[in-house]
Each structure stands twice: as structure tokens, then as C-alpha cells.
Image (cartoon, rainbow, N blue to C red):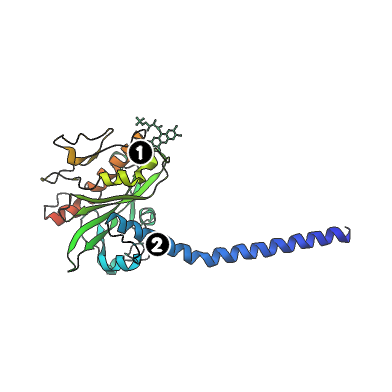
Amino acid sequence: MSSNVKKTLMVALGVCLVASVLVSTAAVELKPIQTKNKKLDMLKNILSAGDLLKEKSNIEDIYKENIEPEIIDLKTGEVIPKDKYDEVVNTNDFDVKSVASSDKWGEAIPADKDIAGIKRMPKVMIVYQVLDKDKNVVKYIFPIYGKGLWSTMYGFISLAKDLSTVEGFTFYDQGETPGLGGEVDNPRWKKLWIGKEVFDPSGKLKIQVIKRKVDPSAPDAKYKVDGLSGATLTTNGVNHLVRFWMSDEGFGLFLKKLRGEKNEKV
Ligand SMILES: Cc1cc2nc3c(=O)[nH]c(=O)nc-3n(C[C@H](O)[C@H](O)[C@H](O)COP(=O)(O)O)c2cc1C
């Protein structure tokens, strides 16, 4: 090998080494920042669902001042005591994907009950209670998720203290087609949810996302939300996931407990 070729190879090798050290250092150094930003983004979405986002305010401060999270057992509706928390289930960084896939905290859903198309779900879920100045709960924010056409859509629904009136609705992670199913993220559409009723006065699950526009003069208009045009499959997905999480398979028993109703499932 001529000395010129050797030199060229040495330089190329040197450049490769320096570049790989730089890339791996950057990856390691940036990891904590990415984790922090991911957490902040999640808090921002929770606050947005609870209509608590204020401009120029620190997200973590608003969260700390206004939100009291609890973890609940979906089978009983009972609050899980803090001494049962572990690295997967805790109120600090509750991640529905990790909890659902955990052997201890997640479970498979029988196909006939899996209307949200998620296959597995957490046995316990986090509920974000929104407090007023006197620390009274004024609304609740629930994580919800389910299959759209192309993706699993993750979001939040917020209910007023009456446990039926929708106060906020948002998706923070979805991969539907922009302009079609991706319109689930359109603020105009999300706003249509506000003021809708999830349950009738007897506690029956009524909320429904319909294929077309809701006739505002129809007597049941308050239980119905407009579907997304050109995106019936995503629309059906949203309808199913909201109904799943508001049913007894999801937060239903917790809601019944709060309403003081008899818990029929246990
Ligand atoms: C490239 C492409 C992307 C699409 N993305 C979506 C989507 O994200 N959500 C959805 O429901 N339908 C999507 N569709 C349309 C569906 O295939 C289907 O036609 C539609 O859901 C029917 O809705 P409609 O009855 O309101 O027209 C897409 C179609 C194409 C060709």
C-alpha cells in the first residue's frame, strides 16, 4: 500500500472516530433534556385538556398549583394507596403504554370487549383532579386512547365536577393523515366537545361521535359530536375509544363511585 493511501485511510478513520464520539456524546448528553421536554409536553397537554394553560406561566408551576393526580384501580374504582406505587405505576411519570405492557399492571382485553382496538390496557389508571383555590376538585382529566385508521391515538378528556359535562378534549399523540383523520388535533373540532354530555341524568353512557354534523335542534344534540368529514374511520375510532374509556371497562366504576352509585361489577 502506498504511503498516500495509508495517510488517506488514517485521516478517514480519524474523522470517523471523532464523528462517532461526538454523536454518542451528544446522544447521551441530550437524553435527560429530551426526557424533561417529553415530560413538559405531557404536562402541557394535561393542562390544555383542563383549560389551564396560561401564556407566560411556568407549566410545572401551574401543574403543581392546580392538579392533584391519583391512581385508581379500574376494576373497583378505588384509589390505589401511595405505598403500592413502584417505578412503573406512580403519579410522577405515569405512561399508559408502559403500564399497559407491564405484566403486573397491564392486562389483555378480551376481543369482544376491545372496542377501542388496543388489545392491552392498564389495570390502574391515573386521574388528574383539578383543584380550585380552596383545594376543592372542580374537574377531572382522564387519559384515553384507542385505534384510529393508521395509529393509536392518545389523548385526554376532561369532565366537570358533575362527572358528565365535557370541559376539554385533546390528543397529544396520533398518526392519522393530516387534513383527514389528523383533524382530531384541530382546535376547532376539539372545541365542539366542550359542553357535551357524556352521560344522561340516570348515568347511562350516551356520548357519540356521529358520521355527519349534529343537528343542534335535535333533543339529543348535547350527547353528539360532529364526525370528521372524509375521515369516517378515524371518527369511528374516536367514538369507540371515548365510549370504551367512559364505560365500566374504563373509568366507569370510578365515576359511579364518585357519584355514590352502587358498584355493580364487584
Ligand atoms: C392517502 C389516504 C389517507 C387517508 N387517511 C385517512 C385517515 O387518516 N382517516 C380516515 O378516517 N380516513 C382516511 N382516508 C380515507 C379512508 O380510506 C376512507 O375513505 C374514509 O375514512 C371514508 O370516510 P368518508 O365516508 O367520510 O368519506 C384516507 C384515504 C387515503 C387515500
Q: Give 25 or 253, whichever is nearer the viewer.
A: 25
Q: Residue at x 20, y 47 (%)?
A: 195
Q: Quadrant of residue 60?
A: bottom left
**In the image: residue 22, left or right of residue 88:** right
Above or below, comparing residue 101 to residue 63 in the picture: above
**In the image: residue 144, left or right of residue 257:** right
Q: Give 168 or 5, whichever is nearer the viewer.
A: 168
Q: Which residue is mark 1?
A: 234
Across and down, in percent, residue 155 comes to: 33, 50
What is the C-alpha distance between the residues marked 2 and 1? 27 Å
Q: Is residue 187 visible?
A: yes
Q: Give 85 or 51, whichever is nearer the viewer.
A: 51
Q: Which residue is mark 2?
A: 39
- Residue 76 is labelled as none
Label 2, residues with CA under 10 Å away: few <14, some 14-19, many ≥20: some
- Residue at the extreme right of the image, as rendered: 2
Q: Earlier in the sequence, mark 2 or mark 1?
A: 2
Across and down, in percent, residue 93 comes to: 36, 63
Which residue type carries mark 2?
Answer: Lys
Q: Residue at x 18, y 60 (%)?
A: 138
Q: Is residue 109 visible?
A: no
- Quarter of the figure that contains the N terminus: bottom right
Which residue type carries mark 1?
Answer: Thr
Across and down, in percent, residue 23 comes to: 61, 62
Asked if disc 2 is less than 8 Å from ligand 1, the answer is no
For ligand 1, which image quadrant applies? top left
Q: Quadrant of residue 88?
A: bottom left
Asked if disc 1 is less than 8 Å from ligand 1, the answer is yes
**In the image: residue 128, left or right of residue 151:** left
Across and down, in percent, residue 260 comes to: 11, 55
